[in-house]
Amino acid sequence: MQKSVMTTRMVLFGLFAMLCSVFISVAQAETPNTGWLKNQNHTPIETRFVLTGQINKVDQTVAGFLEVRLAGDWKTYWRSPGEGGIAPSMTWEDSQNIRSIDWYWPYPKRFDLLGIETLGYKGSVIFPMTLHIDDLNKPVTFKADLTLSSCTTICVLTDYPFELTFTPADLMLSKEAMHVYAQGLSQVPKESALISDVKAEWDATKMQLQVTASKKMGWITPDVLVDGPSDEMQDANFSRPKIDVDGNNITATFDVSSWMGTPDLTGENISVTLKDSEFIAEQPVSISDGIITSSNGLQSILKMILFALFGGLILNVMPCVFPVLGMKLSSVISAQGLEKKQIKLQFLASASGIVFSFWLLASFLVVLKLSGNAIGWGIQFQSAWFIGVMTLITALFGANMLSLFEIRLSSNTNTWIASKGNNSYFGHFIQGMFATLLSTPCSAPFLGTAVAFALATNIPTMYGIFTALALGMALPWILVALFPSIALSLPKPGPWMSKVKYLFGAMMLITSIWLLNLLSNHLSELWIYAIAVIAGGVILLRTVQVHSKKAAGWLSILFAIAFGTVIDSMTSTDLLPEEPKWVPLSSESIQQYVDEGKVVFVDVTADWCVTCKANKIGVLLQEPVYSELNSANIIPMQGDWTVPSEKITAYLQEHGRFGVPFNVVYGPSAPNGIELPVILNEKVVMDAIKKAGNKP
């Protein structure tokens, strides 16, 4: 009996010993970390320092990382923060058994605020670090103070004290910490064999630094950063570079200024950091003296101005002009019987309205750009207020053209108008403005390239590009103004003009229905139907009073057709097949699918983009493209830019685009993507899918 009790005790003791060893192992597996630190005086920011457990016995190093989480719009900065901001820093002099610490910096984002550009991070950022240890077998005390600058419209400087004690030889690997460390390290630029011939030249006369580099795979949407450790480099401010691409070579030109006077960068050792879509690299180089010529930049600007002229001209025949076609033709028809001078002034007024509206759009985009907001072509259609105002204006235009109401002026006003030639030049000016604003949901060949260049360049050049776009779109008006005989050669005015005017008015009301449909992305269906019923009822009632019940009947039929074709065709219809099973746009998922050997077709679109709808109905939902998009090896991926989206805006800008539609095809043979033209066709899409799918 006693022997049995002794045996039981020994078994229990053994189990206890095993449990203790398990607990000890688990405790050792948890690598040291500080936990999340938050300063009570500045709660939007929290940070921590973590060791991964990785040890390099040869170099006597320990791997770890600093992680920073920033709430809302708060941001912190890169090692060279730009014109404003302060780079994060760390003091660790009170640490023991640590020889030095290497700090690695992920590639930053550019931020613009009131014309000041900074470089840094939002959301969450991981800074990998390497601790160089004197003796791996002795305890290490990591005692450091992190000073972190974080900004929105204000800036706050906050200190975070870190303290860890550990023995490197006793550390255990943490899979979770190693995963986070690897994520951070993947965003740190390193030297790349794909980059060669990196040179930097300083032109003291022009105060410009020019960097040239070559990439074996060519360039898509490159960006270049320069910085260096010296006081001269730290005191200098580098503008956003003007980048010219010539095959595999790029030339980046920076305007340089300094608060400390005239900088002298000759002989400075710098780091050139390059980004191109998902590719990042960093190369060291020494700056030499040189003479920088700006001929390439001037040629690029002249080329883009020419693109803008053609893009604006082509915009006149895009689907977006149909809503304003009535106004255009009405202007020409109503010119019958007028003197040539009056015709010239009317059409010059319309052309001036177009130019002014493009300047207005440019100013709107400049304000957004300086305030750090997203910018893009047609972006005003993301605003419910803008769509609502345009819906009201088109309805009023349409009702006026149907003679449902008229604006009565005083006798003095009528006398003043008569003395001016009985023409409202201001009215033609407003027509030109209105035509431009309603045309912006369309993109056209040359237009996208010119707009992207304009939005990425400096403000004076942006206004120049938008002026060229305006002149291109206004060219038909300018031609009539220069040659009034064009208008005078049309059929003589007569009763037929009233019927044509009514047709144009009905077209304008159909435009109102389309715009009202766009409001469904911002308002509930109940509100949309209520607005439609009330507005439609008022218009039909007024039609009965002014014209007849028969006219109101025809108009009601037209409204029914409009709801059936304009609204349903913009969303879903039985005449077209079911849309492909779109996957939400995700840059990370694209890379994963390509690694699996899949082809990814990306469609960035918006409900208000007429060109997008034309591409979808005419190409993407037609054979053989439709079957290809639904095949097992194709991943259809869509980004919806109908309402503002930082993620989609960032994706567009990574590819140098500022508007929709935008289509790219990725695959094993095209990991960086094949960009498709603005207006799609079957051959272009099928060829790109085939090319991207061929395995290298």
Image (spheres, helix red, strand yellow):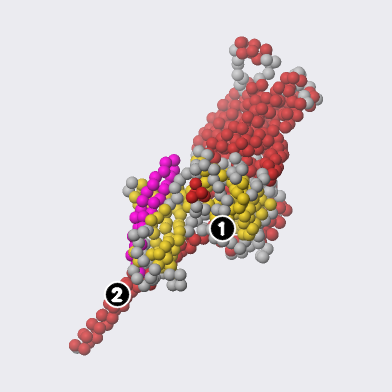
Amino acid at pointer 2: Cys
Residue 110 in the image: x percent, y percent? 52, 47
Residue at 68 percent of width and 42 percent of height = 298
Residue at (31%, 78%) from the top-left corner? 18
Question: Pointer 1: residues within 10 angstroms few (<14), some, or many (20+)?
Answer: some
Placement of the C terminus among the 4 image quadrants: bottom right
Dot 2 or dot 1: first in sequence order is 2
Cα distance in 3D space between marks 2 and 1: 53 Å
Give residue 20's mark: 2
Q: Quadrant of residue 335?
A: top right
Q: In the rendered image, which quarter is residue 142 located in?
A: bottom left
Q: Residue at x 38, y 54 (%)?
A: 146
- What quarter of the picture does the N terminus occupy? bottom left
Compared to residue 153, the image places residue 624 above or below, namely below
The answer to whether residue 112 is visible is no
- What secondary structure is found at the residue carrying circle 2? helix
Residue 152 x, y percent position in the rendering: 44, 43
> Residue 627, labelled with which disc?
none
Label 1 sits on residue: 284
Q: In the image, which residues are magenta?
A: 142-167
* Residue 197 image point, x, y percent: 64, 58
Residue 300, given in percent of the width and then of the height, sits at: 68, 44
* 405 lies above or below 121: above
| Residue at x 68% of width, y 35% of height | 468
Task: Depth check: give the residue in front, 443 or 286.
Answer: 286
Of the pair 433 and 387, the residue shown nearer to us = 433
Residue 661 appears anywhere in the view: yes
Element class at badge 1: strand
Q: Amino acid at mark 1?
A: Pro
Verify whether residue 150 appears in magenta: yes
